[in-house]
Amino acid sequence: MTDVRKEKRKEGEIIPIKFDYVFVSIFNNPQNIEILENFLSCYLEIPLEGIKGNLKIMPRELELESKGSKNKQVDLILDLKGDKINIELNNNFTEGMIERNIVYACNIHGRQLRYGDNSYSNITKIIQINFNVSKKYQTDKLIEKYELKGEEGNILSKKIRIDVINVHKSLEKCYTERDEKIARWCKLMIVDTKNELEKTLGDDLMEENAKEKLVNEVEKYSTDEEVVALYSAYTREELERNTVLEDERKEAREEGLKEGIQEGIKEGIKEGKEDIAKKMIEENFDVSMISKLTGLSLDKIQKIKEEN
């Protein structure tokens, strides 16, 4: 078997920011706050001087109070002058993922009472921004905004909003200057060469120091052998899973799959995920990150950890 730790990126090739580990590592780092300031200035249409010095990265852990639930980590929570901004990267935008994001947004919104005034009227606004990298649930819009509204369209509350940015729509023509810039931020998530990254950044998307930090961070993770190994294992498993699914559909259309073959496929995918989890444990990756990237439960990962 090929040792994934020996794999290297091709000349000029980068790991896309849409890879969960890279996304969280770059944006959940206070040293890179300038990048976030530039993005939010563009997205929220707020002058940069109104954001600089007023943006803070908050702890990512959420306490989910439903029975059987354990603490979960969101991708990124920010505080902007009291308002909360939750940014999520969704590579698999399923119905379950949508419901999960709603729970996360409501949890962040409600937990404000624990840390401040117990008056509901003093709860500040929460905006959840979802980068939908999957091609599922794509609509004709680059950005969709959801609020609590009545049947007549009247807004019940302006204090909670969930936005979905359909990343692959960024490849289409945009007609406003603001949408064109948002589209370029989306392209930054999916480009896989340094040349495309720098071309997308241009000279006007963000300040020079923020631009330099982003390029340096992407290059750092794209040349880190352990991250490359993790990404290679992830993409190989993802390709394998997609190939299996396509084969399943084809066989089902023609004559149907036998139950034994189906179980074998499931078992093979399960073993592949566990192998990836073992490698990540060996490299001391965070258990929550392992769970997010492999889809394995925290209990299963802990069991693998104890067995090794």
Image: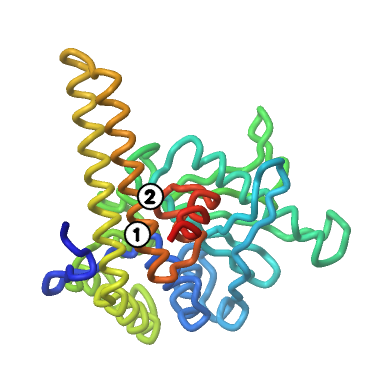
Single out the residue that lies furthest toward the right: 118
Query: Callout 1 environment at 10 Å: few (<14), some (14 to 19), or many (20+)?
Result: many
Residue 232 sits in which quadrant? bottom left
Instruction: Give the residue at mark 1.
Output: 18
Single out the residue that lies furthest toward the top: 255
Query: Callout 2 environment at 10 Å: few (<14), some (14 to 19), or many (20+)?
Result: some
At x 18%, y 23%, the residue is: 250
Image quarter where the C terminus lies is bottom left
Cα separation between marks 2 and 1: 7 Å
Residue 194: percent from the left, percent from the top?
20, 73
Res 139 visible? no
Residue 146: percent from the left, percent from the top?
56, 43
The relative height of residue 105 versus residue 113 in the rendered view (above or below) is above
Instruction: Give the residue at mark 2.
Output: 91
The relative height of residue 159 versus residue 67 in the rendered view (above or below) is below
SS at badge 1: loop
At x 39%, y 57%, the residue is: 277
Residue 134: percent from the left, percent from the top?
35, 45
What's the residue type where badge 2 is placed?
A: Asn
Residue 194, disc: none
